[in-house]
Amino acid sequence: MQVLTGNEHLKFDGMPINRLLSDFWKWNSSDLLNNTMRGAFAEFIIATALDLDLTTTHVDWESYDLLWEDKKIEVKCSAYLQSWYPKNQPDKYSKIIFSISPAYDWIPDEARYDYDNHKRHSNVYVFCHYKSKERAPENPLNLNNWDFYVLATYKIDAIFGMQRSISLSGLINRGKPTKCDYAGIRDAIEKEYQDYLHHEQQ
């Protein structure tokens, strides 16, 4: 499906009302500290770093998040700050935990999961850490506030097995991922993907 512009009007009885699709986006999607929204935003960050086609909508039901050339990429996100923490606890932070749970493959043509195919389906994982602890201003749009850790999926399988989640320290100390900033995402993914190809050839 092609992306919309945001200028589309809601309509009632065939006539536009005084509300645009962009009003919905602002109302629904402005809180980038919301867990669900921040995860989707992290995928968007990686898509921009890879210069992926943004003229079509993102597909939710694939067994991986992004496809860059022939590279299947899973994107995970975590942050110290949460939108739902009480205002009287301004110094309360979350532990940095990433999901690495295996999943069933979705078969869209048959509208069902492949329950015989329970695994991690990507070639590479990108772990996105929003590291800011400053609530004012909250600025996930500043990409200098993010660190990225890239790791080939076969290494996750070998080191962590069927483990469902991992801490940042566990990822760094045991997984030895390639760490980078926004500018280094492409090279980090390429490096880990080449490790994957070399492993497959052995």
Image: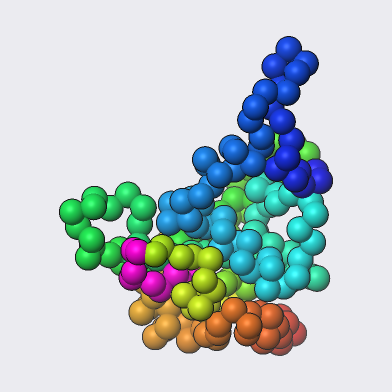
Give the residue furthest to the left: 88
Residue 109 drawn at (x, y percent): 78, 39
Please count the marks in the image: 0
Near-viewer residue (65 or 105): 65
- In-image side of 184 versus 3 (left or right): left
> Measured along the vertical axis of the image, is residue 60 above or below residue 39?
above
Residue 20 % position (x, y): 66, 34
Residue 199 falls in image quadrant:
bottom right
- Tell me which residue sits at (80%, 71%) in the image: 69
The location of residue 40, given as percent across then percent down, is 57, 55
| Residue 118 falls inside the magenta stretch | no
Magenta-drawn stretch, dominant element (helix, strand or loop): loop
Decide whether residue 135 is among the magenta residues. Answer: yes
**Magenta region:** 128-136
Q: Residue at x 64, y 41 (%)?
A: 22
Task: Choose between 137 and 77: the one closer to the eye.
Answer: 137
Residue at point 58% right, 71% down? 125
Can residue 39 be seen by looking at this rendering? yes
Toward the viewer: 118 or 181? Answer: 181
Q: Which quarter shows the N terminus? A: top right
Residue 70, compared with residue 5, is above or below; it is below
Q: Position of residue 106 (x, y in %)?
A: 67, 46
